[in-house]
Image (cartoon, grey):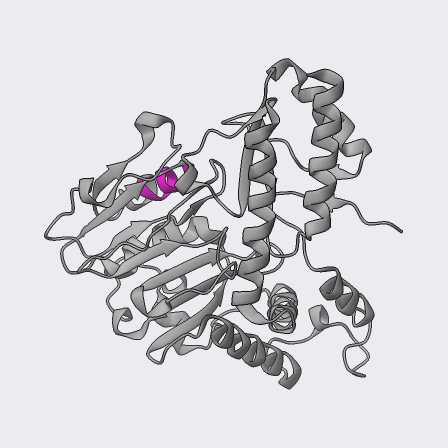
Amino acid sequence: MTRAFNFCAGPAALPEAVLQKAQAEMLDYEGRGLSVMEMSHRSDEVVAIAEKAEQDLRDLLCVPDGYKVLFLQGGASTQFAMAPMNLTSNNHTADYVNTGQWSTKAIKEAAHYCNVNVVATSQGDNFSSVPAFDSWRLSKEADYLHYCPNETIGGVEFDFIPEVDVPLVADFSSSILSQPLDVGRFGLIYAGAQKNIGPAGLTVVIVREALLGNAIPATPSMLDYKTHADAGSMYNTPPTYAWYLSGLVFQWLKEQGGLEAIARLNQAKSDKLYHYIDNSGFYSNPVAVNNRSRMNVPFTLADAALDKEFLQQAEERRLLNLKGHRSVGGMRASLYNAVPMAAVDALIEFMQDFAQRRG
């Protein structure tokens, strides 16, 4: 069977080697006679899987001492509430940067639990850039600053890490593990798994230990980071199979040479696609050049009336999930770690052919 090239923004492509290993171990994990998804989360086997996955993730990101790594449920959307619940007990105020739809949702959710100060927004240019840092209106009483380093829908990526005097909180759902990251500059990092980590159902949280234990009084136990940190992410039954598959992805990333190697590949993939778009005369990308995402590349055709035909013919070529988000339209090619250069080459070849025939 020939696999298609999957450009989905999430749930996204997984490394073929990971899928093959999971397939081989589906019915019988290491001679135990049952699948990982059938095992107790308290079993020695699952505990060992969980511990190795955490250590491999720590190795990949060079997580410093003094941080807890949590494997939770609920997606990044639950983190929109957990962050303010856990981090605003001092001043009940948080600073937020708004660069797209995920930032907007995080701001809306946080407003239920604290005073939200939007320090900067790029809504005025239809979320096609990142506001210059010197224009931000930071508040003196904020308990933290939140931003989304890569907006999946709009394809907007920060080209800097903000330097602030309060804990930095970031939604890394669509860019985590795509390049080296200085975790020590952050108080809290969270990421839904279904883009660069593993299958949907798991959320990774990396939190500075000094920030634990200060949740606002009404915080439910399941939404308190300390609850999960104290229980090794097993306060309740975790998504064990997603955790196992994510662990396989971490091993695969190590085998590729780690995050420096995967960053070079990701840069090469996005550079090639952007170069073609910019020089095609038929396709265009609306994002400011210095804020173009390496992970999510939105583009439009010269005539939007051709969108349906483009998508239909792309699927016939086994180039899947190129339709842009319903809120912005057009196309979007997500180039996560597991998307090979061959997928980019095949996409460009099709785009060239389509433009020649329909341009």
Is 267 placed above or below 325 here? below
The percent position of residue 246, horizontal first and vertical second, equals 61, 66
- Which residue occupies 79% across, 75% down? 34
- Residue 28 occupies quadrant: bottom right
- Which is nearer the eye, 251 or 224? 251
Which residues make up the magenta segment? Answer: 101-107
- Which is nearer the eye, 234 or 67? 67
Q: Is residue 6 visible?
A: no
Q: Is residue 236 visible?
A: yes
- Which residue occupies 80% across, 35% down? 317
Is 354 placed above or below 215 here? above
The percent position of residue 102, horizontal first and vertical second, equals 41, 41
The residue lying furthest to the left in this view is 140
- Which residue occupies 39% across, 74% down? 68
Characterize the magenta stretch by its predominant secondary structure: helix
- Which is nearer the eye, 257 or 322? 257
- Which residue occupies 33% across, 29% down? 123
The percent position of residue 222, horizontal first and vertical second, equals 41, 63
| Residue 182 located left or right of residue 245 | left
The residue lying furthest to the right in this view is 1
| Residue 331 located left or right of residue 92 | right
Is 40 placed above or below 12 here? below
Of the 4 image quadrants, the one containing the C terminus is: top right
Query: Does the magenta segment cover residue 240?
Result: no
The residue lying furthest to the bottom in this view is 44
The percent position of residue 336, horizontal first and vertical second, equals 59, 52
- Which is nearer the eye, 273 or 185? 273
| Residue 24 located left or right of residue 359 | right
Q: Count the marks.
A: 0
